[in-house]
Amino acid sequence: MVIGSAGVRLSHLSTYFTILLRMMSAHIVTAITTTPSSMPARVLIIGAGSISREYSLNHFTPKSTSSTVGGIVDLDIDRAQKLAAEVGLFQSGSAQITMDGGNKYKSRVVVNNDDDDPGAKNKVVQVPFFHSIDDALSTIGDKIDMVYIGTPPTSHRTLVEKALTAGKHVLLEKPLASSAVDADAIVAAANDAKKKKGVLLVMNIGMRYNAARAEM
């Protein structure tokens, strides 16, 4: 079974994502693109809700996990645009991330004081945003190595199948699917994609090692 349940608490996600992305990069270099393995893996974010936002700002970064956000997709185009702007500010070094009351899902993007750098606004990274995964893959698919899916489970099957068909690795949020039929279809698509395209589907399950950590 291709789907692997690997994960840790959010405080350890940088290590987890680094390992995962390096594993995926080996397949990316040999089977999909000519991107050097030393370059950050480029991630397409599907869903601009609180979980996707938290990962986009705090984990999919060159410093944290040798990755970078390459695009944002959400059915609510305004929300996609807002997250893309926040990620662009942060990736360009024009803003810092702070958490309200220590809540990781309430991160605030605080713009730096650029008085000493008049050209700072021109350095902001422009992160593309889209209304659908189809639009994103047709527009920037050649610039994307991996797809992160942080949408409701009813949408997982369609999104996973499209990402794998496009030859992209997938990091999928739990739960796997909303029905047994969809779950079986996702597993079948993952096995087929690994065999034919050398791409992986990995579940992001962050509680697997909780019991072991509690005894440390």
Image (cartoon, rainbow, N blue to C red):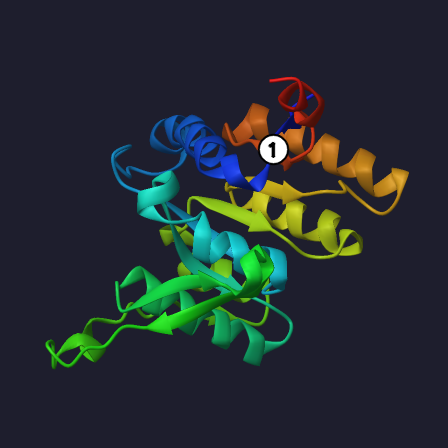
- In this view, 92 is above or below 176: below
Visible in this render: residue 172?
yes
Q: Nearer the viewer, residue 116 or 90?
A: 116
Quadrant of the image occupied by residue 164: top right
Q: Residue at x 42, y 28 (%)?
A: 27
Rendered position, 39 above or below 128: above
Q: Is residue 169 above or below residue 80?
A: above
The total of numbered circles placed on residues is 1
Residue at the image position 62 percent from the left and 62 percent from the top: 50
- Residue that appears at 26% across and 64% down: 92
Q: Position of residue 122 (x, y in %)?
A: 19, 77
Disc 1 target residue? 202
Q: In the visual, does 41 lie left or right of 72? A: left
Query: Which x, y percent locates residue 70?
Result: 40, 57
Residue 59 lies left or right of residue 52; in this view the side is left
Residue at 55% across, 28% down: 196
**Location of residue 207 in the rendering, given as x and y in whole percent from the top left corner:** 69, 32
Kind of residue indicated by mark 1: Val
The quarter holding residue 41 reads top left
Give the crowd class for mark 1: few <14, some 14-19, many >=20 residues within 10 Å: many
In the image, residue 111 above or below residue 69: below
Q: Quadrant of the N terminus?
A: top right
Say which of 27 and 55 sits in front. Answer: 55
Viewer-proximal residue, 192 or 84? 84
Q: Which quadrant would the C terminus be assigned to in this image? A: top right
- Specify the quadrant of the image occupied by residue 112: bottom left
The x, y position of residue 16, in whole percent, is 49, 31
Q: Is residue 19 left or right of residue 112?
A: right
Under circle 1, the secondary element is strand
Q: Nearer the viewer, residue 158 or 109?
A: 109
Looking at the image, can residue 46 be seen?
Answer: no
